[in-house]
Image: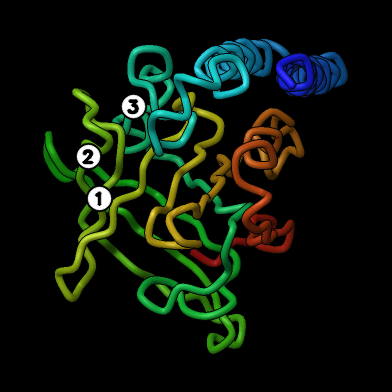
């Protein structure tokens, strides 16, 4: 029995190494094809690969007995992963980001049913808050964009010492907390949406510049597929959204 258990665990470790190698290979291949963008891509690839290695190190595939003692997601580890989960890296972004992937596509409290072309731009309010300006469409908009402006604050979840989540104050004064799974501060943001999909919701946001140029690093999508896609995978924003934006 023990031998079988070891074999299974070794197989899982092997799968993780294969996935990691595939991600880095895909990212590097994109970099070589896009020389004008290679320096930015290379920097992102390094961060993405380092994040994946750290994630692997703290995952239940490497330390199954230790991981089984808690119920937190495998990416919850401030010591090893906290530098990739800084909420201020997102709140200090002033460029437009599009929601490209999500585990859900309806949110009556926010963007409505079958939402599409969701984008956001954060504006400076003061040293402790931002204003998040959302533009989106849904099944009732007839391709006319809606606008939503929300007060946004950094927040701490999972007992992190540094803010690792974004708190939105809705117009009815209720609060939504989105936890940062990964952000490099300039390319893409992967967020945990704990109030969707029974606590396992996710969103992938990508900077408009990369979508327009077709240079979104594959590692962004890989992280979503690896950590979130088994719950659900909806394409929220397509080329029509950011080719002719209406915000």
Residue sitting farthest toward the front: 1
Q: Are marks 2 and 1 in contact (CB under 8 Å)?
A: yes
Q: Earlier in the sequence, mark 3 or mark 2?
A: 3
Q: Say few, some or many: other residues with alpha carbon within 10 Å of mark 2 (under 14 / 14 to 19 / 20 or more).
A: many
Give the residue at x 69% y 44%. Answer: 212
- Here the colouring is rainbow
Q: Which image quadrant: the N terminus?
A: top right
Rendered position, 195 above or below 17? below
Q: Position of residue 126 (x, y in %)?
A: 12, 40
User: Residue 86 got which mark?
Assistant: 3
Rendered position, 14 above or below 192? above
Give the residue at x 56% y 40%. Answer: 207
Q: Earlier in the sequence, mark 1 or mark 3?
A: 3
Q: Earlier in the sequence, mark 2 or mark 1?
A: 2
Q: Position of residue 216 (x, y in %)?
A: 70, 34
Rendered position, 42 above or below 115? above
Give the residue at x 22% y 42%. Answer: 124
- What is the CA distance from the residue labelled 3 to the residue labelled 2? 9 Å
- What is the CA distance from the residue labelled 1 to the residue labelled 3? 13 Å
Give the mark count.
3
Q: Name the image quarter holding residue 110.
A: bottom left
Q: Say few, some or many: other residues with alpha carbon within 10 Å of mark 1 (under 14 / 14 to 19 / 20 or more).
A: some
For disc 2, the marked residue is 154
Q: Name the image quarter holding residue 111.
A: bottom left
From the viewer's side, name the closer residue of 120 and 165.
165
Q: Is residue 37 visible?
A: no
Give the residue at x 60% y 12%. Answer: 53
For disc 1, the marked residue is 167
Q: Say few, some or many: other residues with alpha carbon within 10 Å of mark 3 (under 14 / 14 to 19 / 20 or more).
A: many
- What is the CA distance from the residue labelled 2 to the residue labelled 1? 6 Å
Q: Position of residue 69 (x, y in %)?
A: 40, 28
**Badge 3 element:** loop
């Amino acid at each position: 029995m023990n031998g079988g258990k070891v074999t299974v665990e070794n197989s899982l470790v092997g799968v993780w190494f294969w996935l990691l190698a595939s991600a880095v290979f895909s990212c590097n291949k994109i970099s070589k094809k896009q020389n004008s963008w290679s320096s930015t891509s290379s920097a992102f690839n390094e961060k993405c690969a380092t994040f994946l290695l750290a994630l692997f190190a703290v995952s239940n595939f490497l330390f199954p007995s230790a991981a089984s003692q808690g119920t937190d997601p495998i990416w919850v580890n401030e010591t090893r992963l906290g530098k990739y989960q800084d909420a201020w890296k997102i709140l200090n972004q002033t460029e437009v980001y599009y929601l490209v992937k999500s585990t859900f596509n309806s949110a009556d409290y926010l963007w409505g049913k079958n939402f599409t072309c969701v984008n956001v731009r954060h504006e400076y309010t003061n040293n402790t808050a931002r204003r998040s300006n959302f533009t989106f469409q849904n099944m009732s908009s007839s391709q006319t964009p809606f606008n939503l402006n929300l007060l946004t604050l950094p927040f701490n979840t999972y007992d992190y010492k540094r803010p690792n989540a974004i708190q939105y104050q809705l117009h009815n004064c209720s609060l939504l907390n989105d936890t940062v799974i990964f952000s490099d501060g300039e390319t893409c943001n992967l967020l945990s949406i704990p109030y969707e999909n029974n606590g396992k919701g996710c969103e992938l946001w990508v900077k408009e510049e990369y979508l327009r140029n077709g240079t979104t690093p594959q590692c962004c999508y890989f992280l979503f597929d690896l950590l979130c896609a088994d719950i659900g995978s909806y394409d929220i924003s397509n080329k029509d959204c950011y080719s002719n934006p209406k915000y």
